[in-house]
Amino acid sequence: MKKIGHGYRGFVGDKMDCIEFKIETTSEAVEAISYFITNELEGGVEICDPKDALNQDRTQTWYDFIDESLLNCDMDTVFIKAYFNKGIDIDEHKERIINQLEHIKEFLNIGAGKVTISEIPEEKWANEWKKYYKVFNITDKIVIKPSWLSYEQQNNEIVIEMDPGMAFGSGTHETTSMCVALMEKYLKENDVILDIGTGSGILGIIAAKLGATVLGVDIDPMSVRVATENVAINNVAQVMSVKEGDLLEVVDIKGDIVVSNIIADVIIMLAPQIEQVIKNDGIWIASGIINTKKDIVLEALKQNDWQIVDIVEENEWVALALKKGKLNA
């Protein structure tokens, strides 16, 4: 498919009291668990990962506002908070989450895998997520600014206003920042960009600000709404549109660059399909790949004749720039 952590991915409907499932796990298992919560259970997800604080540039303004206790906690433990509207079958949801954790731990370290449940009043969570978002540089050139904060643009910076609004993608996570670095490297003005699994729209908006025409696609209607709002906030509606649909189903054009910041399993599934929506000599930027699945992703790409043009790795994450053709390896 969202601050000490990724923030929210997905949302839970109208404003009301909600049920929180707090899952104690590891960074390695975050993507798999979050994907299950948002796509199978249609819940909202908040990811609290203390390592994100350490991985950020301490010279950035927001670093001064981090609660010191967060820097002294167990750095190997991540908490995923899954939110659902009050009225769900709690026992059924708990059983499904526990069963999925059992499945995930067959191939990933899920840590303690402890699940605790509580009821959260609306007034507590409605704006709670905003406190985790600050202005920061995603690259030397591009600044991400939450829409509710002020920032004075410096020199030739490109400022992206983001209101994540519970949709995945604020820019703080490695999978996103690596995509941006690869887009900066390979994107040319007037390129057509397809952002598959657009989430908050952040990658597509950055591409639009870099001079591209963009189509963003997401299966989640809340993400489509949030991305559309972010497109308007950033004044790129004339060059970026957002569609609701399952991956490539609603794509009727071909891109110079296709970006898919999703998860390894979906990258594998897309490997034989992306050729349908990419121009000859086009670039496919694939991210969201946990390093424990790097080899099986590379094998799937090799089987589908994708050539690795560029590979970027940060912490436990891998991003690739690919071209169709015989694989060099």
Image: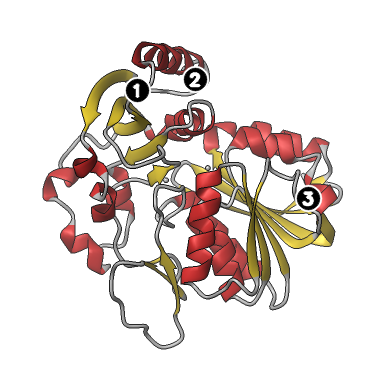
Residue at 42% across, 18% down? 97
Pointer 2 or 1: first along the chain? 1
Q: Nearer the viewer, residue 300 or 66?
A: 66
Residue 260, percent across and down?
63, 49
Q: CA distance from mark 2 to mark 3?
A: 30 Å
Q: Residue at x 59, y 32 (%)?
A: 293
Front disc: 2 or 3: 2
Can the viewer see residue 119? yes
Looking at the picture, tell me which residue is in the foreground, 74 or 1: 1
Q: Which amino acid type is shown beneath numbered disc 1?
A: Gly
In the rendered image, the quadrant that contains the C terminus is top right
Q: Is residue 201 visible?
A: no
The total of numbered circles placed on residues is 3
Circles 2 and 1, Cβ within 8 Å, touching? The answer is no
Q: Residue at x 39, y 52 (%)?
A: 165
Q: Nearer the viewer, mark 2 or mark 1?
A: 1
Q: Position of residue 203 (x, y in %)?
A: 55, 60
- Which of label 1 and label 3 is nearer to you? 1
Q: Amino acid at mark 3?
A: Gln
- In the displayed structure, does residue 77 sit left or right of residue 38? left
Rendering quarter of residue 221: top right
Q: State the residue position of label 2.
A: 104
Residue 75's image quarter? Answer: top left
* Mark identifier at residue 87: 1
What residue would you read off at disc 3? Answer: 307
* Apparent side of residue 300 relative to residue 229 in the rendered image (left or right): right
Q: Secondary structure at mark 2?
A: helix
